[in-house]
Image: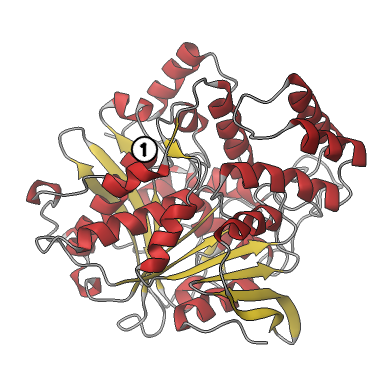
Amino acid sequence: MKVVACTWMLLSMCLLGHHLIIYGEANEDQVLDNFLKSRLLKKPSPAVHYSSWFDVNTDHSSDYIQPQEGSMETDKISALPGQPSGVDFDHYSGYVTVDSKAGRALFYYFAESPENSSTNPLVLWLNGGPGCSSLIGAMMELGPFRVNSDDKTLFRNNYAWNNVANVIFLESPAGVGFSYSNTTLDYQRTGNKSTAKDAYTFLLNWLERFPQYKSRDFYITGESYSGHYVPQLAHTVLLNNKNSNQTIFNLKGVAVGNGWIDDRTGRLGKFDCLWTHALNSDETNKGIHTYCHYFNGNDSEQCENFIHKSYTERGEIDGYNIYAPLCRLNSSASTKGSFDSVNSFDPCSKHYMFTYLNRADVQTALHAKVSTWDLCNDLISIAWTDRPVTILPIIKNLMTNGLRIWLYSGDVDSVVPITSTRYALNKLMLPIKTVWRSWSTNDEVGGYVEEYDGLTLVTVRDAGHLVPSYQPARALTIISSFLAGALPPP
């Protein structure tokens, strides 16, 4: 029997009285914006101080590791409906139980490399939100396939990241995508700490299921609110690596795209981005700088008025990519990418993916137990229990432990723009090792890079919030360089 995840959603809709995003319409930018607004409306702010992260008890007893014999073979996908011919890699999907008492299980999709899978590194990918599915990454960004506009067939992504790594896409936390819990209260007490703990438990059990990867070089990557997820999970892994009774992860580094890492600089950078791209007036930007000091819910009414004016002035554009066309499914004027083309991103792709993943034959092929899939679960973010206001101290801690840290950013994203990332990095005051320079892909400038002592910043030219969606070739250059420990080619 399939687990139906929408019962709690319908109940919570009545209890919370909150405006919900229509199925198939949710975006990481909408969810992140709603999440930040909901945090600011609550007084005192539920944001927790980062220092509590350095005292988290992350010890896991042997009860957290479940028997995995035969599960890898069971999870193997024979074929996805509508997949193209000539698929030359193994892929898997299924569930890993992270709390047997609560019945909490996380869904994953795993794509091995077509070549050198036995030696290529292992990469974990996490989408943000909080509350958005990592199948967005698998089916719209860096995964091996994308969905055609017929909602029925797939085409190959020639720039998929599994060309250079074995990639796990994890739907986290429970309640997101196909992941679920049999204890519905779990959906109302999710936060940063529980998400990191469950993701770590997932990894422990997943490596028991795929033991050939236990000693492999391991990297954690993601985008958007994964600016929280990725560093916090990496910190959890490092803490547990000190426990000799646990599996030791060969964690080498982390990479985050357009990541939300600091509340104040994130908000300020967002509005400065709109102004510098001529989407806001001088008056509005001056008003925000004058009246919005902390973005913590205690700003004046004038601040809120200017923020509202900023969004009004921006108009109906795609916040993910301020120069991209909007999806018009029912309009002949809709701008779509070429059929079977990964080089021209179709703004309606999320609708094709939504329809495809809600087909019964696709869910059967994926071994899914949840009958309704959506891009994001806004209710997860509404009920979020904890988050630090800044991740910068955790990033500094990861630097101290010698991890490779890359922050990359599409330069036409207004959701978490490069402006916000640069403002945040300025707070770290890091010495520069390699001065700002351009890098290239296919004899074109792909973006710009600056290497600091312990951290690398990379921009991606003409890329939005979902960098691999808009610039797949440039994104592959970035991840290839990151894994190789070299800066992108000049």
Residue at image location 61% in from the left, 29% down from the top: 37
Q: How many marks?
A: 1
Query: 132 or 256: nearer the eye?
Result: 256
Residue at image location 68% in from the left, 63% down from the top: 470
User: x and y percent of residue 334 in the render?
Assistant: 82, 48
Secondary structure at badge 1 equals loop
Query: 433 or 222: nearer the eye?
Result: 433
Examine the image and state in which quarter residue 440 appears.
Answer: bottom right
Q: Quadrant of the N terminus?
A: top left
User: x and y percent of residue 91 in the render?
Assistant: 36, 66
Specify whether residue 185 is in view.
yes
**Direction from residue 412 to residue 68 in the image, left or right:** left
Disc 1 marks which residue?
Answer: 370
Residue at image location 49% in from the left, 34% down from the top: 377
Above or below for 79 versus 44: below
Specify whether residue 341 is in view.
no
- The amino acid marked with disc number 1 is Val
User: x and y percent of residue 50 in the render?
Assistant: 41, 44
User: x and y percent of residue 164 in the render?
Assistant: 46, 79
Query: 46 or 164: nearer the eye?
Result: 46
Q: Quadrant of the C terminus?
A: bottom right
